[in-house]
Amino acid sequence: MEVITLALTRDFFMMLSQNKVLNSGAKRWGLKLGAQSVVAGTNIEEMVESVKKLNENGISATIDNLGEFVFEKKEATEAMNQILGVIEAIHKNNLDAHISLKPTQLGLDIEYGFCLENLREIVAKAYEYNIFINFDMEDYGHLQPSFDIIDELSKEYDNLGTVIQAYFYQSEEIIKKYENYRLRIVKGAYKEPENLAYQDKKDIDRNYIKLIEYHLLNGKFTSIATHDHHVIDHVKNFAKKNNIPQEKFEFQMLYGFRKDLQLKLAKEGYNFCTYVPFGNDWYGYFMRRLAERPQNLNLVAKQVFSKKTNTLIGIGAGAFILGRLSKK
C-alpha cells in the first residue's frame, strides 16, 4: 500500500473523531485495544489513582471527563454531575489538579442558557474548593459562544481560564483580550478552512511561539501545551532572558506521552501539568490524538487498511500501535 499523505490522513482521522456510529461502537470495546495507554481509566476512582501517581512525581493534572456528541439534556446533566463528582474527588483526596471541560459536553449544542447554567454550577462548586476550571476550545463554530459564557461567568467568579488556538488568524486579538486570564496555548486540533486558520505548519508554529512569548511577557499565567522539545527549550531560554519567574508558567503534555520528558521537566523545577482524560467516551479524543501526531500517522494507517477488517477493529489496531509508540 502506498504511503498516505499527511494532510489526507489527518483529515481522515478528524472525520472519524466526529463519527457518531464509531463513537458509540468504540465504547463497547473499552480501552483494551491500546487506548488505555493515553486514557487514565474509565471512572473517577481509576482516574484518582492515576493522578496520585503523577502528584507523587511533582506533576499536577488537568482532568478531562471525556464526552462527545451531547445533544440531549439528560446527557449534559449526567456530564455535569460527573464533573461535580470529579471536583469533590479532587477536594477529598487533596489532589494537585484542576478541571478541563468542553462547553459542548454541557449542552452548548442544545441551548445556550441551559449550558450556561450547567457551567455556572460547576464553576461555583469549584470556586468553593479553590479549584481552577479551564474551558477547552473546540471548532470555530463553537468559539464565540464559548467565549460569551466565559465573559458571563467571569462577572461572578475568577477561577476560570481558557485555551488559545494558534492556528486561528484572530488568535493574537483574542489573547490580548484575555491576557488577564490563565491561558493554555495550543496549536489547534480541529480542521478549519483557510479563510479562518493557517494551514501551513510553519505558519502555525510561528504564530504559536509568538502567542507564547506575548502571554509570558504580558499575561497572568501561561500553560504551554506541547510535546516538542524544541519549543520547550525556546521557552526556557526566553524565560531566562526576560527574567520571567517559573511560577508564571507551566509546561503541559498529554497523559501517556513523553513520560520521561515530563518527569525530567518536573525534576528540573519547572511547573508541569499533565492533561488527564478519563471515561468510556474515549474514541473522539483518541482519533484527534492520532491526527495530531504526524510522525505516527502513516504507520497507523498501514495497519488500519492493510487487511479487510471492519473499520472499528482497524481503528482499534491503530489505537494499539499509537499506545505502544506513546510509551517510547
Image: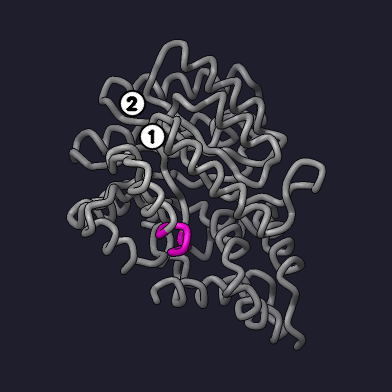
Residue 193 visible, this angle: yes
Q: Which residues are magenta?
A: 227-233
Residue at 72 percent of width and 35 percent of height = 141
Residue 75: which numbered mark, if any?
none
Residue at 54 percent of width and 49 percent of height = 209
> By what rule are the colours in the image chosen?
one colour
Front disc: 2 or 1:
1
Residue at 40 percent of width and 77 percent of height = 328
Left or right position of 30 against 54: right
> Is residue 128 rendered magenta in the image?
no
Residue at 27 percent of width and 62 percent of height = 263
Query: Pointer 1: residues within 10 angstroms few (<14), some, or many (20+)?
Result: many
The CA span between labels 2 and 1 is 19 Å
- Counting residues from the N terminus, which is met first, the one under dot 2 or under dot 1? 2
Residue type indicated by callout 1: Phe
Residue type indicated by callout 2: Ala
Q: Secondary structure at mark 2?
A: helix
* Res 237 quadrant in image: bottom left
Q: Nearer the viewer, residue 194 or 322?
A: 194
| Farthest residue, direction top | 155
Is 88 above or below relative to 305? Answer: above
Q: Nearer the viewer, residue 132 or 251?
A: 251
Residue 276 visible, this angle: no
Left or right position of 153 against 4: left
For label 2, the residue is: 126
For label 1, the residue is: 221
x then y, percent, for residue 294 = 61, 69
